[in-house]
Amino acid sequence: PKGVEMTHRNLWVNAATFGWQAGVSDRDVYLHTLPMFHCNGWGFPYTVAAMGVPQIVLRKVEGPEILRRIDAHGVTLMCGAPAVVAMILEAAATWDGPIPGSGEDGRQQVRIVVAGAPPPTRIIERVETELGWEFIQIYGLTETAPLLTMNRSRSEWDDLSPGDRAKKLVRAGAPALGVRLRVDEDGELLAQGNVVLKSYWNQPEETAAALEDGWFHTGDGGIIDDESYVRIHDRKKDVIISGGENVSSIEVEDALFSHPDVAEVAVIGVPDEKWGETIKALVVLVPGSDLAQCDTAEAELMEHCKAHIARYKCPTSIEFRDELARTATGKLQKFKLREPYWAGRDRQVN
């Protein structure tokens, strides 16, 4: 783990930029749906506190309760991981009457800022058509306070269908005010700006690597399109984002490798409508092992993982293979392993 050292300037610039670009004012009411230990769980509240915005705090994040609080307090602004969006859509299906925050009751429309991982295009479309809310997507990291990009519907998109507008909004967004972005020769997204961390606490070598040549190396692969919008295509660091939580595929692989009957393993993220991605393990068993001869191999390996790592990091499915795709040097080719599960999509992360 790395301790990210932020400056007052980092946090002030992030709060001011967020407030400006999201159109925050003292007429808003903010609903906390992010854990306050998360970088955006404290980052965005700096914005709303500075703007004099009333804040509503939930004890437990549940779809029906979110809708009740929006209805009771006139909430106009909230953040959430894709899993929270899925909860709200599920709760809205059984809500009696107009959806709170849709603007049908004469109050302001809700703006929901989604971060952590973008949901599928059809989920973005449903936020507009089923909830009547405005969908805003951002991209950033703890190391950038966190805001790097924002994607908010533009006036020139007003005549588009909800589906076509969702295809625009699925992108990570354009650079936030004062942020400079570029993609290096390896396809990694690099960033400069007053939101970039000062250092990793007491880790000078890691700091130097992350800030090489004066650019912060995000570890995410992507492109910048002809409209200057960022599209995240792949994650250079082997991290899966499930329900807004970062899961290291290497950590999960290590847990599975500790089972004596596992010969090879690759852990990948596969698309999931509710969680964005779920964790899938592709496993080659030791030939002739006891596990290879039984019908409960998947359940046994899942229980093994639960004994070694946090439950939210454990695979939700395990598939057994005879071999795994590798390069000539023996390196796993995870992009090839992911391909069948992401067929028909323009990227291999959600």
Image: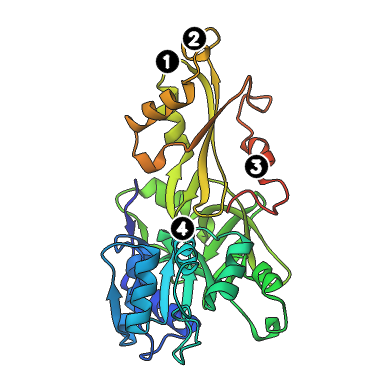
User: Where residue 41 sits: x, y (%)?
Assistant: 34, 66
Residue 199 seen in the figure: yes
Q: What's the amino acid at mark 3?
A: Tyr
Q: Which residue is mark 4?
A: 83
At a point 63% along the width and 40% down the height, the residue shown is 338
Disc 3 to disc 2, how far (Cα)? 28 Å
Question: Relative to 50, is 122 on the left or the right?
Answer: right
Residue 96 versus residue 280: which sits nearer the camera? 96
Q: CA separation, marks 3 and 4?
A: 20 Å
Q: Which residue is mark 2?
A: 289
Q: Which residue is mark 3?
A: 341
| Among the 4 quarters of the image, the one containing residue 123 | bottom right
Q: Residue at x 72, y 79 (%)?
A: 160
- For disc 4, the neighbor class at 10 Å (few under 14, some 14 to 19, many from 20) is many
Instruction: From this view, report whether residue 279 is shown above or below residue 92.
Output: above
Q: Position of residue 120 (x, y in %)?
A: 60, 59
